[in-house]
Image (spheres, helix red, strand yellow):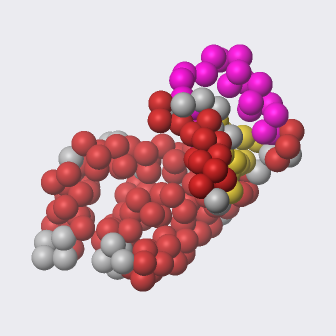
Amino acid sequence: MTELAQNKFLVVSKRYAQALIELQNAGVISSDEILNDLKTISDTLKTSQDLNEVLSNPVVGIDDKKDIVETVFADKISATVKNFVKVLIDKNRFSAFKYIVFAYEKELDLIKGVERVEVVSAVEMKQEAKERLQRKLEEKLKKSVIINFEQDAEIIAGLIIRIGDSVIDNSLKHKIDNLSKEIIK
């Protein structure tokens, strides 16, 4: 996907995410219900590539797509989110669905004062270390923190912490790479 197409999806996704926030603020539906419904749709799309392709395909008729949504998600999601998906189909925006989910989660995090953090370690961290890191990050950021822990043996040791656009790379691999660059100079 080109950078221009990505930027278009970002602008569109923010607009639709804001519409979900407005529904939530108006008391039409709770943020938890929206999140659960969006997760149900996302999980279904991940397990059924065919469904994703059909709903994103401009050749398939709009009414057919709406019927498919109605059938597949009949009792699985709220009527409000189902109607939201139908609007995406009407406006030929369903291909931006995953970006809309991401934008909605970001907007909701801003409202709730939550920061999502990605932590990469070479080995599995002990639960005590994870909790200590979470407390330190919450103190530092003065926000509630949700951490996604990942493992990557290639970093050798240490941690890589991603907070928004910032990266704190305290991995041994990074230090070795920097040392190699200094030696070459």
Residue 9 can be seen in this image: yes
Residue at horizontal 23 percent and vertical 64 percent from the top: 55
Q: As drawn, is 175 to the left or to the right of 85? A: right
The span shown in magenta is: 116-138
Can residue 119 be found in the magenta stretch?
yes
Out of 130 and 182, give the one closest to the viewer: 182
User: Split into 4 quadrants, where in the image is the N terminus?
Assistant: bottom left
> For the C terminus, which image quadrant?
bottom right
Q: Place residue 5 in its image quadrant.
A: bottom left
On the image, the x and y values in percent for residue 149 come to: 57, 33
User: In this image, 31 relative to 132: left or right?
Assistant: left
Determine whether 37 is above or below 139 in the image.
Answer: below
Q: How far across and down, in percent of the image, does residue 72 sit?
A: 23, 48
Give the residue at x 85% y 43%: 140
Residue located at (63% from left, 17% from top): 126
Total number of numbered discs in the rendering: 0
Left or right: 24 as drawn, with respect to 7: right
Closer to the camera in the image, 166 or 53: 166
Image point (68%, 40%), residue name = 170
Q: Position of residue 63 (x, y in %)?
A: 19, 71
